[in-house]
Image (cartoon, rainbow, N blue to C red):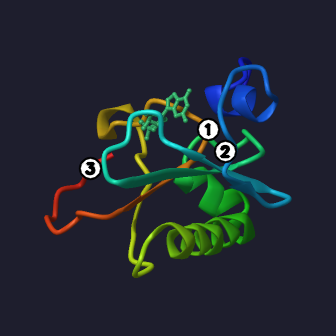
Amino acid sequence: MTERSIFTRILDGDIPGEILAETDRLFALRDIAPQAPVHLLVIPKTSEFRDVTELAAGDPALLSELIAFATRLAQEHTDDGDFRLVFNTGANAGQTVFHVHAHVLAGGLNEKSVGA
Ligand code: 5GP
């Protein structure tokens, strides 16, 4: 990636953004435009993977860590621990930031809408 992503710039402290939680390889933010009562983003600190397909192929252990981290965050931020995990993959599927990230959505998700 030639230009640093918005998430890397937040991680580096160059633009504002509260880091809710982190591990050695991942961090979490609240989405700036929430689509559900709980809407968090779980993001690898590395920007080398553009989307979840690249992450799965390139570092499956990191994808597994991401899911475990999302699960922990959902337990901390909801009453029941239930959540929806969304990876928009490709511009035509709504992806706008090409630094892989998962949307963790929870609360008021009774419909089957795809959201985020
Ligand atoms: P995508 O559309 O790529 O799946 O998701 C990118 C997400 O990043 C969007 O939901 C958008 O609201 C969020 N976002 C974009 N800029 C910022 C920002 O500066 N701070 C935070 N916390 N979220 C952002």
Distance, label 1 to label 2, CA atoms, is 6 Å
- Confirm if mark 3 falls within 8 A of ligand 1: no
Q: Which mark is nearer the camera, 1 or 3?
A: 3
Dot placed on the residue nearer the N-terminal end, 2 or 3: 2
Q: CA distance from mark 2 to mark 3?
A: 23 Å
Identify which residue is drawn at 34% across, 36% down.
94
Could you tell me residue 99's position as x and y percent?
61, 38
**In the image, 31: left or right of 24?**
left
Q: Are marks 1 and 2 in contact (CB under 8 Å)?
A: yes
| Residue 54 coordinates in the image, percent (x, y) | 61, 51
Q: Secondary structure at mark 2?
A: loop
Label 3 sits on a secondary structure element that is: loop
In the rendered structure, which amino acid carries the disc numbered 3? Gly
Location of residue 44 in the rendering, given as x and y in whole percent from the top left corner: 70, 51
Closer to the camera in the image, 20 or 42: 20
In the rendered image, the residue lying farthest to the right is 24
Kindly check if marks 2 and 3 are in contact, taking CB atoms under 8 A apart as contact.
no
Query: Distance between the Cα atoms at labels 1 and 3?
Result: 19 Å
Residue 115 badge = 3
Label placed on residue 99 = 1
The answer to whether residue 87 is left or right of residue 107 is right
Instruction: Specify the quadrant that holds the N terminus.
Output: top right
Residue 16 rendering spot, x and y as whole percentages: 67, 25
Residue type at mark 2: give it: Phe
**Which is more foreground, mark 2 or mark 3?**
3
Which residue corresponds to the image point at 31% horizontal and 34% vertical from the top-left?
92
| Quadrant in the rendering for residue 107 | bottom left
Residue 84 numbered mark, or none: none
Residue at horizontal 41 percent and vertical 77 percent from the top = 79
**Which residue, given by chain and number where applicable, does mark 2 sit on?**
49
**Disc 1 or 3, which lies upstream in sequence?**
1
Number of other residues with Cα within 10 Å of mark 3, as a class: few under 14, some 14 to 19, many 20 or more: some
